[in-house]
Image: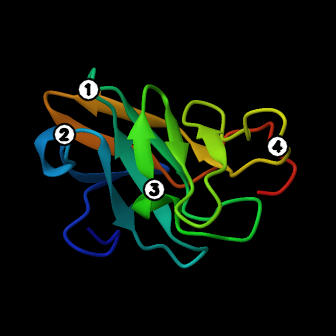
Amino acid sequence: MQATKKAAVQQDWIEIGAVDDIPRLGARVVKTPDGDIAVFRTADDKVFALRDRCPHKGGPLSQGIVHGHRVACPLHDWKIALDTGEAVAPDEGCAASFPVRVEDGRVWLSLVPSEGCPNQ
């Protein structure tokens, strides 16, 4: 999915598609001028969005394994919390998180990162 591909804009939010377009325990990538955003769907159908870049070595989080509400980076297995983007201890760092909402089965993504991650 690309942000430029038939995305309906509503203020700072873009519609990126249906929840069912994102596989359970998987991710889709939204390309933006400021960098890729990985949109994840958990086994319990929660949807989260993080900058698609691990804070450790920049691995593509969208290619990691989702378990619970975390994703494991495919490069060095760092665990990143999907709700905050924070690395799970003992690792340190964070990937910027982005607000997501689901309305009538459609996923809306804010292109403005949430506050809290110093390495946005």
Return the disc, 4 or 3, that comes first in the chain's sequence. Answer: 3
Q: Earlier in the sequence, mark 3 or mark 2?
A: 2
Q: Quadrant of residue 86?
A: top right
Q: Would you call the spot at circle 4 few (<14 residues within 10 Å), some (14-19), or many (20 or more)?
A: few
First-in-chain label (3 vs 1): 1
Mark toward the viewer: 1 or 4: 4
The residue at which mark 1 appears reads as: 45
- Depth order, front residue of 105/48: 48
First along the sequence among labels 1 and 2: 2
Q: Does residue 64 appear left or right of residue 8 in this picture?
A: right
Residue located beneath label 4 in the image: 91
> At label 3, which amino acid type do we have?
Gly
Q: CA distance from mark 1 to mark 4?
A: 27 Å
Judging depth in this view, the residue of 27 and 71 nearest the camera is 71
- Reply above or below: 71 against 95: above
Residue where numbered disc 3 is placed: 64
- Circles 1 and 2 in contact, beta carbons < 8 Å: yes
Work out how far the residue at label 3 is from the one at label 2, CA to CA, in angstroms.
19 Å
Label 1 vs 4, first from the N-terminus? 1
Identity of the residue furthest to the top in this view? 44
* Crowding at mark 2 (Cα within 10 Å: few <14, some 14-19, many 20+): many
